[in-house]
Image (cartoon, helix red, strand yellow):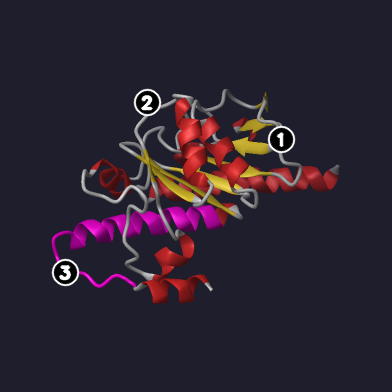
Amino acid sequence: MTAILSEETKLRDQIVSVGKSIFDRGLTFGSTGNISARLSSGELLMTPTNASLGSLAPERLSRFSAEGVHTGGDKPTKEAFLHQCMYCQQKMSGAVVHLHSTYAVAVSILADIDPDDVLPPLTAYYVMRVGSLPLVPYFPPGDKALADAVAEKAKTSHAVLLANHGPVVAGKTLLDAQYATEELEETAKLFFILRGQPVRPLTGAQREQLRG
C-alpha cells in the first residue's frame, strides 16, 4: 500500500511540474490543455476542468478507475475521453499530453496539408519522437464523436492533430509525452518559417534508419 501511495504521490507531483513548465514557456495559456498519466494499477490521474496548467494542485487532480470512471479529485475535463481513447489504442502508453499550442494549432487550420501526415520529416528528433502526425477532422470540443475519430487515427500513431484545435500525444512516460509534444510544436514552427522556401526533408531511407 505504501509503495502504491508513493507511486501516486510522485506522479501527481510530476504532472504539476510538467504542467508548470509547459505553461511558463507559453506552450499553453489560460485554462487550455490537459495532461494525464497512468498508474501501474491502470488508474488515471488527469488535470481537472477549468484548471491552468501553470497552477495545478496535486491533491486536486481528477482520478479515474482503470475502467474510466471518475473516482476522486476535482471535476474532470470534458476532454477526458481524448486521453482515454489514446490509452485504449496505445497500450504501452503511460501518459498523454493535449495542448492548444500556437504553431501546431495554426498548422491544423491550413487547407493544403496532408491529412495522413501533417508535418514533413524536417529533423531527426521529430521522426524519433513523433514519427507521423495524422489529422483528425474537426468536431466541437467535448463532442463524443471525436473519440471515435481519434481512436481510429491512434491505431497507427501515438500523436494526432485535431483540426482547428491542437495536438494529442501519448508517450511511454510523462516526460516522453511532454518531449514529443514540444518537438511537434517546434517542428510546426519550423514548418511556418520555411513555408514557401525550397526544403530538404529527411528521405524515406533516413527515416527508416532512425526508426530502426
The amino acid type, in three-letter code, at marker 1 is: Ala
Give the SS element for disc 2. loop
Q: For residue 34, say whether it is visible.
A: no
Taking the magenta stretch, the answer to whether it contains residue 181 is yes
Residue holding disc 1: 66
Q: How many labels, in total? A: 3
Residue 207 in picture, x, y percent from top left: 42, 71
- Number of the label disc, if any, that sits on residue 45: none
46 displayed left or right of 97: right
The amino acid type, in three-letter code, at marker 3 is: Pro
Q: CA distance from mark 2 to mark 1?
A: 26 Å
Residue holding disc 2: 140
Residue 5 in picture, x, y percent from top left: 78, 42
Q: For residue 178, say whether it is visible.
A: yes
Residue holding disc 3: 198
Give the SS element for disc 3. loop
Taking the magenta stretch, the answer to whether it contains residue 151 is no
Figure quadrant of the C terminus:
bottom right
Note whether 22 is above or below 63 in the view shown: below
Badge 3 or badge 2: first in the primary sequence: 2
